[in-house]
Amino acid sequence: MKTFKNAIGVELLAPAGSFDSLQAAANAGADAIYFGVEQLNMRARSAGTFTIEDIKEVAEFCKAHAMKAYLTLNTVMYGHDMQLLKSILKEVKTHGIDAVIASDFAVFEYCTQLNIPLHVSTQTNVSNIESVQYFSRFADVVVLARELTLKQIHE
């Protein structure tokens, strides 16, 4: 089981769609942030997004503020996305992003090949213990489906 730095086992995770929101997360005491790059994340159209060139600065900022940085690559990956995906993951590896949050098996595969920590996204809709067991082969963190009740999560 993954352990976190505070006593109750909760990691305060904040979205960061811009450098302003990244600073706000640090000011608010977030343990970690998640951010997207280019068009390969679910917030690409609704929020500002970082570029591949920003990965280094985000990583450095997070390290300087003792926050973890998680990159979301949680869209459907089509064949035409593979070159961009590989370029992004190369930067993730180079700059020490803490983990990638993903739902597509191509991302799982490339993260495995590059030894990049993986978190299974809520977009994967994990809603039962059998699915948790299956995805635990790929990741230490599995984000459960949003639709689950607290009772279902407990079970």
Image (cartoon, helix red, strand yellow):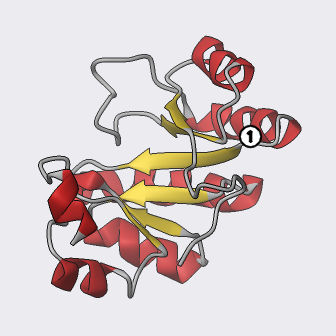
Please give left or right for residue 95 compared with residue 148 in the image.
right
Please give left or right for residue 19 compared with residue 125 in the image.
right
**Type of the residue with mark 1:** Lys
Pick the front one: 84 or 77: 77
Please give left or right for residue 98 compared with residue 80 in the image.
right
Pick the front one: 38 or 62: 62
How packed is label 1: few (under 14 Cα within 10 Å), some, or many (20 or more)? some
Q: Is residue 132 above or below residue 54?
A: below
Quadrant of the rendering where the C terminus is positioned: bottom left
Image spot of residue 37 (x, y percent): 48, 36
Q: Residue at x 19, y 47 (%)?
A: 146
Query: Is residue 125 in view from this perspective?
Result: no
Looking at the rendering, which quadrant does residue 135 occupy? bottom left
Residue where numbered disc 1 is placed: 56
Image spot of residue 40 (x, y percent): 35, 42
Q: Residue at x 44, y 63 (%)?
A: 119
Query: Is residue 90 in view from this perspective?
Result: yes
Image spot of residue 83 (x, y percent): 41, 56
Pick the front one: 141 or 110: 141
- Residue sitting at the far right: 64
Q: Residue at x 69, y 52 (%)?
A: 6
Image spot of residue 137 (x, y percent): 38, 88
Q: Residue at x 75, y 38 (%)?
A: 62
Pick the front one: 135 or 55: 135
Element type at marker 1?
A: helix
How many discs mark residues in the rendered view? 1
